[in-house]
């Protein structure tokens, strides 16, 4: 069981929210990585006819940068979700047990 910041198990709605957020993080990471790869590698290779060494360097740089951008995007989305979930689990005022009390 994972520590959620409060006692008890996760509800079905919380598990669904986590699943959706992970899916969103992965899909948005792929989209951003493809955009970066296209801008760094595919775009210049389609627009110009560079020598083989330059084309190889562009492909390597595009793949490396796309991988880094993918990981950063997924981590950022999941950290934001975790921070929002932690903030929602905490009372709005110290010493109070319920946000609406």
Image: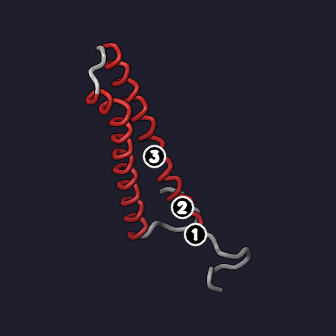
65 or 92: nearer the viewer: 65
14 displayed left or right of 6: left
Q: In the rendering, at what x and y percent does residue 59 appear? A: 34, 25
State the image coordinates of residue 9 (x, y, percent, origin top left).
Answer: 48, 66
The residue beneath circle 1 is 89
Q: Which mark is residue 41?
A: none
Q: Which residue is mark 2?
A: 4
Q: Which residue is mark 3?
A: 73
Residue 75 horizontal side relative to residue 90, left or right: left
Label 2: which secondary element: loop
How far, Cα to Cα, is label 1 from label 2? 9 Å
The C terminus, quarter of image: bottom right
Under tag 3, what secondary structure?
Answer: helix
Q: Are marks 1 and 2 in contact (CB under 8 Å)?
A: yes
Q: Which is in the foreground here, disc 3 or disc 2?
A: 3
Whole-angstrom CA distance, mark 1 to mark 3, is: 24 Å
């Amino acid at each position: 069981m994972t520590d959620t910041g409060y006692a008890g198990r996760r509800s079905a709605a919380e598990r669904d929210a986590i699943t959706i957020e992970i899916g969103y993080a992965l899909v948005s990471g792929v989209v951003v990585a493809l955009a970066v790869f296209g801008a760094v590698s595919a775009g210049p290779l389609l627009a110009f006819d560079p020598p083989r060494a330059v084309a190889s360097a562009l492909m390597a740089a595009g793949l490396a940068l796309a991988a880094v951008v993918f990981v950063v995007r997924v981590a950022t989305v999941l950290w934001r979700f975790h921070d929002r979930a932690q903030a929602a689990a905490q009372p709005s005022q110290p010493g109070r047990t319920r946000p609406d009390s």
